[in-house]
Amino acid sequence: MTRPVYVHDLAALASDARSIRSVLPDRVELLYAVKANPDRGVLETLAPVVDGFEAASRGELRRLAEVLPGRSPAAFAGPGKTDEDLTAALAAGVRRIHVESPAELDRLAAIARSAGRSADVLLRVNLPVAAPGASLVMGGGPSPFGMEPAEAVCCARRPPTGIRVRGVHAHLASGLDAPLAGAVAATVVEWAVREVGAEEVDVGGGMAVDYARPGTRFDWAGYGRALAGVLAEHPGVRLRIEPGRAVTAYCGAYLTEVIEVKRSYGEWFVVVAGGTHHLRTPAAKGHAQPFTVQRRTGAGGPRTDGGPLTVVGQLCTPKDVLSRSADAGPIGVGDVLVFAMAGAYAWNISHRDFLLHDPPEFRTGDPHELAEAWASRH
Ligand SMILES: Cc1ncc(COP(=O)(O)O)c(C=O)c1O
């Protein structure tokens, strides 16, 4: 039995990132939200393509400093920043600190003054925008994220000494398709320019990834055209976006081997090595992780009948479900399942110590080539 393996296809990631960059207007800065996948190879691959990185913790600042020394993070964001976090962000030379509340702004100002310097900030605003169909809405209602519009206007008009308010940041929802993301960006920029006189606006991430249709992608070209329209309306503004999931989801795969197939009360279960403690994405989002099957060479033994089945892992909980499929075909012991779209919010959000199973291995390359080699090794 081989341990499950995460495979990052860095060549595919580089090509995806370049094509995203190529359809965005030059005046849109593309930041990568490190929280989606802070893997060293991922960061190194994205570094020459993106305009910067958005970090949301001291750990992410440290990771960026280790992997890309000498390159200051473009943004530092996130709720609940401690004084130590703010101090670390200033010390790391972060270009823009995204401030979540008037109280945080005051603390940052005091820290900056005591260090004899100033801080450049964007005010994170919780704006009411319509986002029908979005998977995760973080704005427009009571929320720990950002400040209410009136508070942001006050902070922008009377910033504490030591603070330069450069503009506005908003990350209002996840799972936005391109037309909706474009409409949200237009609303945010329009508000930011009108109410705050913003020179810079970061409209966040949240571009949709459709796990039910792995062949489809966020319409970056359409979004680029929408952003070009926004810039035409506001020629003085510098626009920034900070996607995570839609950049890296497709470059990661989780490969694992079938330990057992069994029938229970008329339903097929495929039990694989590993589980949601390695790949939490399907449990976190409540979806079936898409997968393909690499048939074990010379396989004998029991197989499912080709009908509907549930793929589960090794955890002692009924929540350890990686996928369900109606048409995966017959699956047997020793087959290798290749779970696609495991490059964002996957290993790094997983409850990896639950049951103290071994961690997965990590490789780079083409996951299907690896699966083929693995399945023929028996
Ligand atoms: C402030 C902020 N920016 C960017 C992102 C990245 O979002 P996504 O990975 O959905 O593009 C997040 C995700 O939670 C976020 O909170």
Image: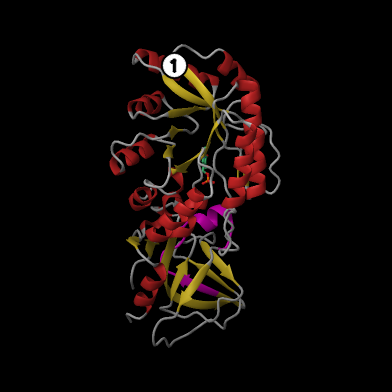
Decide if residue 33 is in sight here.
yes
Whole-percent x and y of residue 11? 38, 60
Span highlighted in magenta in the image: 269-288
Whole-percent x and y of residue 275? 45, 62
Whole-percent x and y of residue 298? 39, 88
Whole-percent x and y of residue 349? 45, 49
**Does residue 311 appear to the left or right of 135 in the view shown?**
left
Q: Which residue is mark 1?
A: 109
Q: For the residue carrying disc 1, how many other residues have a C-alpha within 10 Å: few (<14), some (14-19), or many (20+)?
A: many
Decide if residue 278 is in sight here.
no
Magenta run includes residue 99: no
| For residue 223, above or below residue 267 | above
Magenta run includes residue 279: yes
Q: Quadrant of the N terminus?
A: bottom left
Residue visible at 59% across and 56% down in the picture: 286
* Disc 1 element: helix
Residue visible at 43% across and 44% down in the picture: 50
Pick the residue in front: 222 or 293: 222
Pick the residue in front: 26 or 99: 26
Res. 123 image quadrant: top right
Res. 75 image quadrant: top left
Q: How many marks?
A: 1
Residue visible at 32% across and 80% down in the picture: 377
| For residue 363, above or below residue 87 | below
